[in-house]
Image (tube, grey):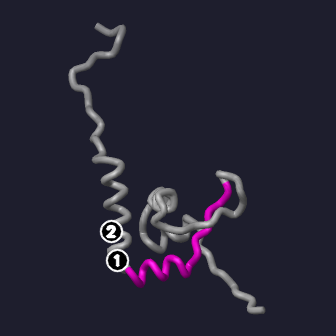
Amino acid sequence: MTNKKFEFYTVAELAVVLKVHVNTIYHAVRVGRINALRVSNSKKAPIRILKSEIERMMAYDGDKLIDRMVQQRIKERGPRKAPSIATGVEKKGTS
């Protein structure tokens, strides 16, 4: 019987390695772009990603992987709107 040792990334570690935000990693896991494991059955359980999975993805896609993940996230989220600044508005109760 062979004794395999698996190495994992946490979401935060993978975000640092890929230079993306942790939410991008969570989204990629949620939509199935990255295969991941939960430590337990709870929905709030920590997620672990096999290092071999990321190495396989990087060997196949290389730098395009990160660009596609980010572009898809932007496309799904939509463009961000700049906050509007009201001009000439007086506070209530002042004259």
| Residue range highlighted in magenta | 45-60
**Residue drawn 35% across and 51% down?**
76
Q: Residue type at mark 1?
A: Asp
**Residue drawn 47% across and 58% down?**
31
- Near mark 1 (Cα within 10 A), the count class, few <14, some 14-19 or many ≥20, is few
Which element carries disc 2, helix, strand or loop?
helix
Name the residue beneath numbered marker 1: 63
Q: Main secondary structure of the magenta part?
A: helix
82 vs 2, nearest the viewer: 2
Location of residue 2 (image quadrant):
bottom right
Is the residue 51 above or below the residue 13 in the image? below
Location of residue 87 (image quadrant):
top left
User: Would residue 49 be found to the left or right of residue 65 on screen?
Assistant: right
- Near mark 2 (Cα within 10 A), the count class, few <14, some 14-19 or many ≥20, is few
Task: State the mark number for residue 67.
Answer: 2
The quarter of the picture where the C terminus appears is top left
Is the residue 77 above or below the residue 89 in the image? below
Q: Residue type at mark 2?
A: Asp
Given the current orientation, which residue lies at the most extreme right position? 1
List x then y, in percent, for residue 57. Answer: 44, 78
Which element carries disc 1, helix, strand or loop?
helix
List x then y, in percent, for residue 65. Answer: 37, 72
Circles 2 and 1, Cβ within 8 Å, touching? The answer is yes
Q: CA gap, disc 2 to disc 1?
A: 7 Å
Is the residue 66 above or below the residue 78 in the image? below
